[in-house]
Image: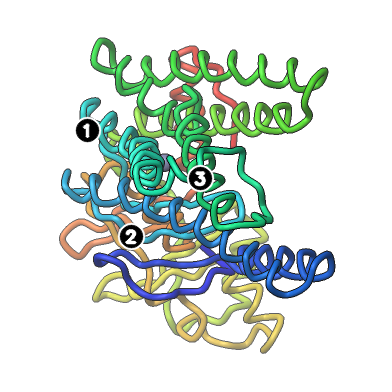
Amino acid sequence: MSWSLRLGKILGIEFRIHVTFLLLLFFIYASAYSQKGSAYAVRAVLFISAVFACVLIHELGHSLIARRFGKEAKSITLLPIGGVATMEEMPEKPAQEIAMSAIGPLINLAIAGILYLLVGQWSGVSAPNLYPESAQAFFAGLIGVNVMLAVFNLLPAFPMDGGRVLRGILALKMDYAKATSAAVSIGQALSMLFILYGIFFNWWLAVIGLFLHMGAGSEKQQVMLRSVLHRVPATEAMATDFRALRPDESLSRALEHVYHGCQEDFPVVTDKGIQGILTRTGVLSAIHQKGTTLPVSEVMDRNFISVDPHIPLDQIYQQLLSGHKTAAAVVDRGRLKGMLCLEGISRYFMIQAALKGWGAKSS
Ligand SMILES: [Zn+2]
């Protein structure tokens, strides 16, 4: 995630903090300080830090369970709106998804329970107060926060954990795409209730509803994409009618091909096979800086993605997105067979979705 600082590793998982989170801490400190001075401000920052420590443990729970199922947990990032655990891929077996999703809210309930046993009888439970006046108010508020986090995360709507638990339960009975579709509909109905109720009674609920509504839509899109693409090999959607360049050709030669065709990414080949990919963004920034006389070999991306013909499209799509690339070369035993670009894969998906009657929106 851009704009985030790496703080280190916890149990082998990278831990990052988004700069906006630090801004939030600073803002809370400054506003508390201006109201009642520094001791008050320090308490406010401690309270928020304690809340986010609970969020961090929640996310660690997701990551560790995912790791148990063999899915690599990459990082956890703290944002002002909560934590995000990034993993290589999500478990698709329903029981695994249920376990992995439910653990987060369960951890918050456990924290609330433990804190209650330790200090609850003495301090009680209360609605969280950002500026706790006393140690009692601090712990009572922290218990309250954890209960709220558990309830909020268990809402049966994407992207909340509850949405995934619901999908997992439905997927025990039906196929994954159908279960997603049903879970999305339930989540969206719930989010509409939030929005309607919120407009009249509480704006925050309306904002949460809107957030849930958008989350549901994007989850559906992703799952549909995966369910269509994960059995389709690269050869099915690759371009076979393309132009290739030689490393010693000039950029102006490449530009001619851009002008007279629709191709944007060019494989650069010699008799030894493909040496790189010349991308549109590469060409544009090179001619902006150095003109059009440079040879292609100086501008091409040598660190390009090369895939076997039988690799499924969803994997290639993910690889392109996470590597910030626009095109991959399909290579069979050292020989260039075709080119695959992001637009090509999206186009393939839209056509297949239309054939299935999903009426998928382009994204
Ligand atoms: Zn969670």
Question: Pointers 2 and 3 in contact (CB under 8 A)?
Answer: no
Q: Residue at x 65, y 62 (%)?
A: 44
Could you give the CA–CA distance between mark 2 and mark 1, rounded to whole angstroms?
A: 18 Å
Q: Label 3 neighbourhood size at 10 Å, few (<14), some (14-19), many (20+)?
A: some
Q: Amino acid at mark 2?
A: Lys
Q: How is the image coloured?
A: rainbow
Q: Label 2 neighbourhood size at 10 Å, few (<14), some (14-19), many (20+)?
A: some
| First in sequence: mark 2 vs mark 1 | 2
Residue that numbered label 2 is attached to: 74
Q: Amino acid at mark 1?
A: Gln
Could you give the CA–CA distance between mark 2 and mark 3, rounded to whole angstroms?
A: 38 Å
Q: Viewer-proximal residue, 360 or 198?
A: 198
| First in sequence: mark 2 vs mark 3 | 2
At mark 1, the secondary structure is helix
Residue that numbered label 1 is attached to: 96
The label nearer to you, 2 versus 3, is 3
Residue 123's tag is 3
Please say whether residue 149 is visible from this viewpoint.
yes
Please say whether residue 348 is visible from this viewpoint.
no
Q: Label 1 neighbourhood size at 10 Å, few (<14), some (14-19), many (20+)?
A: some
Q: Position of residue 132 (x, y in %)?
A: 64, 54
Q: Residue at x 28, y 32 (%)?
A: 97
